[in-house]
DNA sequence: CTTCTTTTGGAAAACGTTTTCTGAAAACGT
DNA sequence: ACGTTTTCAGAAAACGTTTTCCAAAAGAAG
C-alpha cells in the first residue's frame, strides 16, 4: 500500500506538506502543490481514511437508526427512501453512514447503546421516528447528550439535538379539507372515520390535532380510532365503522390501503384519504388524496444537520415542505 | 476518552496485556485477565475500532452494492431485505457494512471505484445483480481481483470471487410446472406467454432455460417476450398477447403485477405466475403462484462468505434453497 | 542593506491500537 | 537440583495520517 510517506519521498517534500496539500491548506506554494499532486497521480496514492480519522479524531461517521420491521408486514419503502437520501448526501459531503435497525438495539440498555456507538466512532446519530414509549433506552441515550442527534419525525430540540419533520398538523388539515371538499361535496351529512396512527407518538398526535381542528371548522361528526399504522388494524376498523360513515381519513397510506381493501370486501364505496405519498398506492391500484413528503430530501437535510451539530452549532427545528397529492393509478404505473 | 493505556495503568499491567485480553489471546493468566476486565469495567473503557483497524490492517468493512432504483418505479423491497440480512449478520460477526447504491457508482471508471473503495478501507464487496452490460465498470473492477467479492445473483467464481444464488433454472421449471398443472388443467391447448427478465442477464437466462425445458416436456406453445423486469413493460406485453394465450408466466412478481393489471383493464381472466415471493403481491391483492426466496438469509450468507474470502479461502458457488409458494390475499394481510 | 513581517516547508509528536520479540518465571522431566 | 521446555507479561515498533511548532526563505519597509 502506497502511503503519504512514499508520496513525500517521490515529490521530494515532507510528509506534512503532502498532508497539507491533501487537505487544501492555504500555505503551500502553487509549484509545490503541483509537484505533490504529480507524485500522487504517479503513484496512484489514495489516502487512508482510517488513519486520517484516527489522527484527526474526526471519523465523519453518522449512524442512521431506522425503525424498519416494527410492523413486519409493511413494504419498507419509507426507510429505504431515508437511506438513499442520507447515503447519497453523505457521500457528497465526505461523510459515512452506518445503518442501524432499531430492532438491533431493542435489547440493549442506553449504556450499551452508547458503548456500541462509541466503539463505532460514531459522531452523530440520525434517528427516525423515535417513540417515547417504544424506544425507551434509545430515548434515554439521546437525552443523555452523549451524541449529537438529528431526530426525524420526533420532537425534542436542545443544544445537541435537532428535529426535522413536516408540519404534520397543517398537512393533515389541508389534505383532509381538500379531500372532503372534492369527495363529499354531494352528501349533506359529514360523518368521518379518522384512523389515527399511534396512541402516543408525535406525528400521530399532530395529525390528529389537524384533523380535529378541521372537524370543528367544518362541523364534522368525527369518529377517531387508533390504527397503529397497521394495515390490518385499519382494515378491521373500516369493516366495523365504515358502513355508517361517509368518508375515511387515515394517518398513513398503508392504513388507507387497509381501509380500501375492507371496502372492497364489503362491496361498498367510500372515499379514502391517505398520508405519505408512497409508491405503494400505485400497487393498490386506487386513486386517493394523500400528503406527499420527500423522504430522500428530508434525510439529506438530516445529514447536513448532523454535520452542523458536529461542527459545534446548536440544535434547531427544521420544517420540511409537504404537498397535497391525488395519486392516480396511472401516475405510478406509467 | 479513556484508552487502553488508562486501563493498563489501572490494572497495573502493560498495554499489550490489555490488548491480549481484549482479543482473547490464549496466553494470559486467568487472574490477570480478571484484573484487566475489572479495570475495563471500572473505567467504562470501550475499544476504539478505528485505531484497531489501523493497527491490525483489518477494517472488517464490507461494501454492499445494491442496484436500487435502476427501475425507479419499483418499491424496493428486495434490496431492503438484502440490507437487513447483511447488516444484522455483520453485526453478529463484528463486521461493518457500508451500503452503496449502484447509481452512485454509475459515473465512475473501474479505477475510480477501486480508489473509492480503497479509501474507505473496504476489504470485500457484496454485489447484487451485477449486469455484464449495465455495470461495465463495476464488472471490470470485480474482475480485476483488487477486492474479494461475493456476487449475489450473478455468475463468475474465481480465487477471489464467490457467487450466491438459487437454482433459477430449476425454480422456474418447478413453479411453472405446478402452476400450469393446477391452473390450466381444464384447457386443452397450452399457449403460454412467458415474460422474461432482461435480454442479457444471468438470472433471466437461467429462468428462461428452465421455462424452455418445461415447454419442451409439456409440449407447450411458448411465446417469449422480454419485460426487462418492468411492471409497465409486462403490462403492455400482456395487453398485446394475452388475449390469444391461456396463461402468463413472468420472471418476476413485479412483472406479474403488471400482467394482472393489464388483465383487469381488459376484463379477461388468465392465470398468472410470478417469481420472487415479495410482499408486494399482497398489495396487489391477488393470489398467485411464485417462487419464494429468503433474501435476508442470502445476504447473511454473503456476509459470511465475504469473511471467508477475507480470511484467504478461495471463492466458490453457493446455491440457496427456494420454495414454491402460492401467495394468497390473506397470507399477507392478516 | 538592515530589520521586521509574512509565507512556506519540515521535524516530530501525537492518535489508540496490534503484534512481534524478548526475557523472566514457572512447570516439567530426570 | 539441574537443565529444558512452556507459560506469561512487558517493551517497543509499527499502522498512516494530522497537527503543532519552529526555522528558513522571501518580501516589505525603512
Image (spheres, coloured by chain):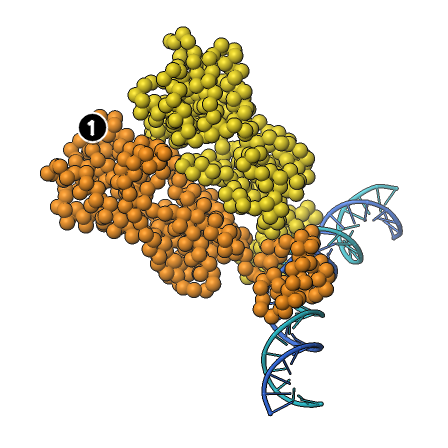
Chain colours: A orange, B yellow, C cyan, D blue
| Left or right, residue B311 beside residue A178 | right
Position in image of residue B43 (x %, y %): 55, 59
Q: Residues within 10 Å of mark 1 (few under 14, many from 20)?
A: few
Q: Where is residue B146 in the image (x, y as percent from the top left)?
A: 66, 43
In the rendered view, would you say A245 is above or below B26? above
Write down the quadrant of residue A181 in the picture.
top left
The numbered mark 1 sits on a residue in which chain? A
Q: How many marks?
A: 1
Farthest-out residue, left: A188
Residue B218, placed above or below residue D16? above
Which residue lies at the image location 55% right of the left edge and 24% below the top edge?
A: B206
Q: Where is residue B286 in the image (x, y as percent from the top left)?
A: 35, 24
Which residue is nearer to you in this view: B240 or B178? B240
Residue placed at 44% from the left, 61% from the top?
A309
Q: Residue at x 65, y 60 (%)?
A: A37
Work out whether residue A136 can be spotted. no
In this view of the protein, can residue A167 be seen by the observer?
yes
| SS at circle 1 | loop
- Position of residue D1 measured from the top left corner of the image (x, y, whole percent): 87, 53
Q: In which quarter of the image is the C terminus of chain A?
A: top left
Q: In which quarter of the image is residue B5?
A: bottom right
Residue at 38%, 47% in the rendered image: A295
Furthest-front residue in this view: B240
Does residue A219 appear left or right of residue C26 in this picture? Answer: left
Q: Which residue corresponds to mark 1?
A: A268
B115 or B285, which is in the foreground? B115
**A128 horizontally vs B53: left or right:** left
Q: Nearer the viewer, residue B225 or B41?
A: B225
Amino acid at each position: 500500500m502506497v502511503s503519504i510517506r512514499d508520496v513525500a519521498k517521490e515529490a521530494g517534500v515532507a510528509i506534512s506538506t503532502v498532508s497539507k496539500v491533501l487537505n487544501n491548506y492555504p500555505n503551500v506554494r502553487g509549484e509545490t502543490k503541483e509537484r505533490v499532486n504529480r507524485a500522487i497521480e504517479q503513484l496512484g496514492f489514495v489516502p487512508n481514511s482510517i488513519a486520517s480519522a484516527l489522527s484527526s479524531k474526526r471519523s465523519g461517521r453518522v449512524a442512521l437508526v431506522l425503525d424498519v420491521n416494527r410492523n413486519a408486514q409493511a413494504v419498507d419503502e419509507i426507510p429505504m427512501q431515508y437511506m438513499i437520501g442520507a447515503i447519497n448526501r453523505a457521500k457528497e459531503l465526505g461523510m459515512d453512514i452506518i445503518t442501524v435497525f432499531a430492532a438491533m438495539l431493542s435489547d440493549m440498555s442506553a449504556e450499551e447503546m452508547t458503548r456500541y456507538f462509541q466503539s463505532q466512532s460514531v459522531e452523530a446519530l440520525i434517528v427516525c421516528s423515535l417513540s417515547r414509549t417504544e424506544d425507551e433506552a434509545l430515548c434515554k441515550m439521546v437525552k443523555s447528550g452523549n451524541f449529537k442527534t438529528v431526530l426525524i419525525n420526533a420532537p425534542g430540540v436542545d443544544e445537541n439535538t435537532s428535529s426535522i419533520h413536516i408540519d404534520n398538523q397543517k398537512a393533515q388539515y389541508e389534505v383532509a379539507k381538500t379531500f372532503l371538499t372534492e369527495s363529499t361535496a354531494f352528501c349533506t351529512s359529514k360523518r368521518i372515520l379518522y384512523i389515527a396512527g399511534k396512541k402516543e407518538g408525535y406525528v400521530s398526535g399532530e395529525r390528529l390535532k389537524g384533523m380535529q381542528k378541521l372537524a370543528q371548522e367544518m362541523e364534522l361528526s368525527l369518529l377517531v380510532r387508533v390504527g397503529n399504522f397497521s394495515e390490518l388494524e385499519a382494515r378491521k376498523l373500516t369493516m366495523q365503522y365504515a358502513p355508517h360513515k361517509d368518508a375515511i381519513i387515515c394517518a398513513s397510506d398503508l392504513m388507507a390501503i387497509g381501509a380500501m381493501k375492507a371496502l372492497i370486501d364489503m362491496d361498498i364505496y367510500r372515499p379514502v384519504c391517505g398520508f405519505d405519498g408512497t409508491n405503494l398506492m400505485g400497487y393498490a391500484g386506487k386513486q386517493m388524496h394523500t400528503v406527499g413528503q420527500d423522504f430522500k430530501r428530508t434525510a439529506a437535510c438530516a445529514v447536513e444537520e448532523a454535520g452542523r451539530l458536529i461542527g459545534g452549532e446548536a440544535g434547531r427545528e427544521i420544517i420540511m415542505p409537504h404537498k397535497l397529492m391525488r395519486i392516480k393509478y396511472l401516475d405510478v404505473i406509467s
